[in-house]
Amino acid sequence: MPSTDFSPDEGPDFLHCGARPYWFGAARRLLEIPVTTSFAGLLAGGLLEGAGKPLYGAATSALGYRLHVPGVLARLGVVERIRLTPEGITPDEHKRLTRAMLRAGHKVFTLTYHSPSLAPGNTPYVRNDTDLGAFLDSLRRYCDYFFGEVGGRPATLGEIRSAAVPMNGSPAFP
């Protein structure tokens, strides 16, 4: 989960991880395809890929959360971190994220959710049949946008791996 720190809940810290697929491990033989999480908004461009991350980090500090700074920045259109999921994220947010990532040259998008969300009552995102309808509609609307308006296409893990094999010494996903 790029740009996310779970250490306050005794989990891993992924603040240093980017949103593009990358090879890792001692022999660089493992391909990480991150959960699509990135930034949208006026300061989302190149700033948050490097020097701007501290700004978002400060906004999401304990004090920043108490003062609702992340929400204020998002509502003002300055910067917001968005994950590509129907769990608590709207189709409009999905589109903002996708447009921002396409402008930054991203080529791989992973739409994710927890499978228990497909049955009412298992997650806070789908509590009843009405929530399930909205959840499925959100998935449909994003797929219509991505495959229709954007011209995206589905890919297998093997296809993504093949595209990630370095060509002429440079990675396919810089």
Image (cartoon, rainbow, N blue to C red):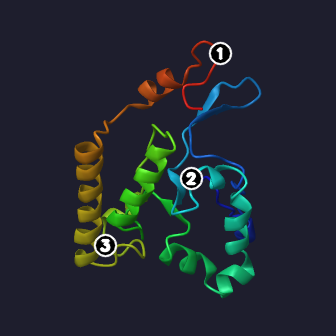
Q: Position of residue 112 (x, y in %)?
A: 43, 53
Q: Secondary structure at mark 1?
A: loop
Q: Quadrant of residue 155?
A: top left
**How far, Cα to Cα, is label 2 from label 3?**
37 Å
* Position of the N terminus by quadrant: bottom right
Residue of label 3: 120
Give x and y (percent) for residue 126: 34, 73
Residue labelled with disc 2: 45
Residue under the point 41% across and 66% down: 87
Residue 88 in percent (x, y) is at 42, 71
Local crowd size for mark 3, using a 10 Å CA cut-off: few (<14), some (14–19), many (≥20): some
Give the quarter of the figure containing the C terminus.
top right
Q: Looking at numbered disc 2 in the image, what kind of residue is underneath it?
A: Gly
Q: Secondary structure at mark 3?
A: loop
- For label 1, the residue is 169
Q: Earlier in the sequence, mark 1 or mark 3?
A: 3
